[in-house]
Image (tube, rainbow, N blue to C red):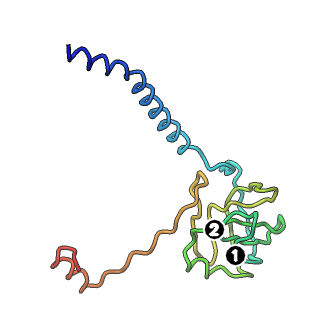
Amino acid sequence: MNCFRSTKRVLRFAPLLTATLLFAVLAIASSAQTMSRRVPGYDGTREVTLNGTIQAVISQRISGRPVGLHLLVASSQGVVDAHLGPYLTKATQEALRSGQPVQVVGAMEKIHGRSYLLVRQLIFAGRMVTVRSERGFLLRAQPLARPTTAKTATQIELTGGAL
């Protein structure tokens, strides 16, 4: 009789458990599908390449503009506000100067009624910097690996990695 009561309790909660599991599976599938999409507003099929000269480097936050570094680039199409995002390394930011020739690849997008070039790739002074993935996601700059000296490598070998 005890076994019958516990089975009855389990059966009473089975629909709730099934509904919860179904909801969880659908939520995970939905988020996975969203992750595979492009960034809203970034259409890689409409990418353009602009060659021009940097008129200004804007690092201060201005209300209504996308967060991060902006370049005002004078090109044959006029002055374009090129959005580079907040993740460029300090060295890259410091290397960008007014009057410098630059090539930017990205997609034009209207945000709050203004047009911006969402830069995917930046080429200047013999350097190529990838700012966004091909789907438009901003990429974080990877810190440079610390060079190991012979002494440090030997210490690591002797101590098993503990310095």
Amino acid on which the number 1 mark rests in the picture: Gln
- Name which quarter of the figure residue 8 lies in: top left
| Sequence-first tag of 1 and 2 | 1
Taking the spot 62% from the left edge, 50% from the top edge, the residue there is 39
| 27 in relation to 163, above or below | above
Disc 1 element: loop
- Name which quarter of the figure residue 11 lies in: top left
Disc 2 element: strand
- Name which quarter of the figure residue 54 lies in: bottom right
Q: Nearer the viewer, mark 1 or mark 2?
A: 1
Q: Position of residue 88 (x, y in %)?
A: 57, 71
Alpha carbons under labels 1 and 2: distance apart: 20 Å
Cβ atoms under marks 1 and 2 closer than 8 Å = no
| 157 in relation to 19, above or below | below
The dot on residue 122 is 2
Structural crowding at the residue carrying mark 1, measured as other residues with C-alpha within 10 Å and reported as few (<14), some (14–19) or many (≥20): few
Q: Nearer the viewer, residue 83 or 47?
A: 83
Taking the spot 75% from the left edge, 75% from the top edge, the residue there is 53
Which residue in the structure is indicated by mark 1? 60
| 90 in relation to 84, above or below | below
Query: Which residue is situated farthest in the bottom direction here?
Result: 151
Q: Is residue 10 left or right of residue 56?
A: left
Q: Position of residue 162 (x, y in %)?
A: 22, 76
